[in-house]
Amino acid sequence: MKHYPTNLTDSQWMLLSGILNDNRKRKHSLRDIFNAIFYLIKTGCQWRMIPGCFPNWELVYYYFTRWKNNGVIEQVHELLRDKIRKKAGKYESPSLACIDSQSIKTTRLGGECRGFDGGKMIKGRKRHIVTDTMGLLLAVVVHAANVHDSKGASDVIALLKGRFERLVKIVADGGYRGELIEKTKTTFGWILEIVLRSDHSSKFTVIPKRWVVERTFAWFESYRRLSKDFEYLTNTSQVMIQIAMIRLMLNRIKK
């Protein structure tokens, strides 16, 4: 098989195969399937345009859909994040999280859940994410761009419930002010802290704590499949983001 920069190294595949724990013999190895998926998300090609040196695109798409629906991709993502946090000397569960949204255009083919974000002047969808202080993804929800941040935040914050026992505080920008603060406290017991820009400086300044989640959005730019929302279904968009983070985390753990 032709080597691409997106292909898994031997050490990365050893780590990934240990998580999958699937040793059944196949005509095409799962390593080749993952390599094809990583190639697609990095280059932004269409499923039918996956190079012929990879397994047939129908087979790659079959495994992608299967892993998306049965939670394998999410499970791999969660375990890799926990490994990175432990490697950095941190608990698996963070005590502080950061939340933000990113409005992104969709393609002309459309799909479910689209709208117009009047503030950003973008027709498409919003990616709502929560990260830890390392910028690693804790939760993601993709919804129409016309959904207000406070509503989208409620949906993504709800995904944290029961998963992170040490979580105490979530940092957000001014768009999350209002009843969401009280709702987060009464429903989940977490503090939603609003961190605003300083009005005293005319120069660009890094906003304490909030810069972490904004850097995560910048990481997405390294993956052409995420340059727009090309997916018809929002849950597929969410899984594509998790795959990008899996690729990023594998590069951090193993070379």
Image (spheres, rainbow, N blue to C red):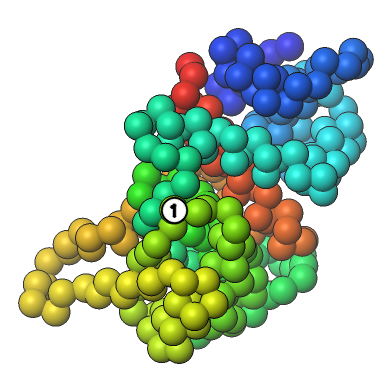
Question: Residue at 45% across / 89% down in the picture?
Answer: 179
Question: Residue at 69% across / 13% down in the picture?
Answer: 2
Question: Residue at 90% across / 13% down in the picture?
Answer: 25
Q: Secondary structure at mark 1?
A: loop
Looking at the picture, tell me which residue is in the foreground, 103 or 13: 13
Q: Position of residue 22 (x, y in %)?
A: 81, 21
Callout 1 amino acid: Arg
Q: Position of residue 114 (x, y in %)?
A: 68, 75
Q: Which residue is mark 1?
A: 166
- How many marks the image carries: the answer is 1
Question: Residue at 52% across / 53% down in the picture?
Answer: 164
Q: Position of residue 52 (x, y in %)?
A: 81, 23
Looking at the picture, tell me which residue is in the foreground, 186 or 39: 186
Number of other residues with Cα within 10 Å of mark 1, as a class: few under 14, some 14 to 19, many 20 or more: few
Picture quarter containing residue 23?
top right
- Would you say 231 lies left or right of 147 here? right
